[in-house]
Image (spheres, rainbow, N blue to C red):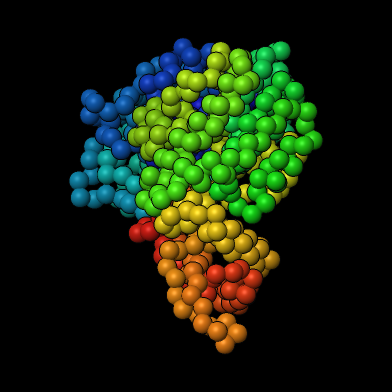
Amino acid sequence: MDKILVLDFGGQYNQLIARRVREQNVFAEVRGYNKITLEEIRAEGYSGIIFTGGPNSVYDDSSPHFDPAILKLGVPVLGICYGHQLMAWMAGGNICSAGNISEYGKVELKASPSPLFKDIPKESVCWMSHTDYVNKTPEGFDIIAVTDNCPCAAMSCEAQRLYGVQFHPEVTHTEFGKQLLHNFLFDICGCAGDWSMGNYCKTAIASLRDKIGAGKVLLALSGGVDSSVCAALLAEAVGSQLTCVFVDHGLMRKNEGDEVEAAFSKWDINFVRINAADRFLAKLKGVEEPERKRKTIGEEFIRVFEDESKQLGSVDYLAQGTIYPDVIESGLGASAVIKSHHNVGGLPDFVDFKEIIEPLRLLFKDEVRQLGRELGLPEYLVSRQPFPGPGLAIRVLGEITREKLDILREADAIFREELDKSNAAASQYFAVLTNARSVGVMGDARTYGYTVALRAVTTDDFMTADWARIPYEVLEKASSRITNEVRSVSRIVYDITSKPPATVEWE
């Protein structure tokens, strides 16, 4: 299998570069520039290397650098933005600051004939984000693209198969970025494009069987996409050697707990469902502050899992549904730590195990979903929308009660059902039970019921999100059904706030 190394120099798009490569059926992995040696790169047998961008200036001694011998390995290299400048610097070129003449955003690119620009028009639009630029190319390099403000927007050394671009081909704003990456992968690196999730699935199952042998595996199953696919993969690999502990905290959406249990009925595994709603509600009694809700639920989840784990005795492996963005965002290589993920932090100290295994740690979210389909998980589980760990607890504003949860479950199910039927464009949609009550009229009688807020957003990455323009008739149908079918609800509102300034969730 062909492999592309994405060498991370702190660029914000390092994950995106790897995704773009994998979209063309070529495997790519992100490694920090300070987490891999030249000898390891040579031993891995990569088909090509991509240097990422980064926020630094190459002429700053504190900036990330690498052994210049990487350019002598005989492996094709594509430098992007900072990676382009670093390549020039390492090969003997010169970099300087453009001062006030920086390029940010869409820029007209003028390209010369080159294998890198095959099937790309001479003039196209690219996405720039730089102040420094290459003002003197290394010996043996030719300039193959320019812009009005950048005299070296791309360069190449055909003899050594070294290429650098100042712009970002991985972002959608670059008009022919996908074609440029295709040219590098297939025409320059000679990749076959034979990496697929079907092949990955077979390889992963065989690898897990070999590693686990006759050992026992324990997995805390939340019911989310990642842990569910992890469970299915392990179930296919080792069957009855796997114990899945599914803690149903009573804060899930309508029928969700039953759906999760049903999804795993076809495998011969030890599936333990703990119905702990009463236990969680008792701990949450009187708790209104959102962060305290989260901590209370997280701590109680650990206690429940701990109680069950003690009954199981010793296990050989503890499995987790860590995925690739979790690893990268928790501080891989030069990238800033975006957030700490529980799956890649400290290991639990209450389970007696020999080793932790993370079968999904090389996959992105969309790849995890596709793997779930390959494993035969039902679509309602594989395509499940993002759902917070604390569940409906953070969609019930104020104190949580069983009555409030039941009201929200029904209202949420109706709203999601109506949007599903309408095929309205939205990435995530749900209902929120506010703490506000207002006067209503039903059957000539005065009512005093809850206000339910409906939330729907569109987004590519959930870092930012816009409120979804749901057709009025769909909102009207959902509102009518909720107020007629769900007791104690007298008013419906629709949230038209984007992220930022708001978050997707209300709490």
Quadrant in the rendering for residue 58: top left
38 w.r.t. 487: above or below = above
Count of marks, rendered view: 0
Residue drawn at (55%, 58%), measured in percent from left and top? 403
Nearer to me, 343 or 10? 343
Quadrant showing the C terminus? bottom left
Q: Nearer the viewer, residue 450 or 70?
A: 450
Report if residue 164 is visible in the image: no
Front-lying residue, 361 or 177? 361
What's the residue at 51%, 46% (across, down)?
Answer: 281
Task: Residue 476: tell me if it is visible.
Answer: yes
Q: Residue pushed farthest left?
A: 99
Image location of residue 122, percent across then percent down: 48, 51
Name the quadrant containing residue 242: top right
- Furthest residue toward bottom: 444
Give left or right: position of 309 versus 298.
right
Q: Position of residue 448 (x, y in %)?
A: 48, 75
In the rendered image of this protein, does residue 123 appear above or below residue 280? below
- Residue 433 versus residue 127: which sits nearer the camera? 433
- The residue located at (60%, 14%) in the rendering is 314
- Position of 452 compared to 214: left or right? left
* Residue located at (52% from left, 74% from top): 490
State the image coordinates of residue 278 (x, y, percent, origin top left). 56, 44
The N terminus: image quadrant: top right
* Residue 413 in the image, given as x and y percentages of width and height: 63, 60
- Give the image quarter of residue 319: top right
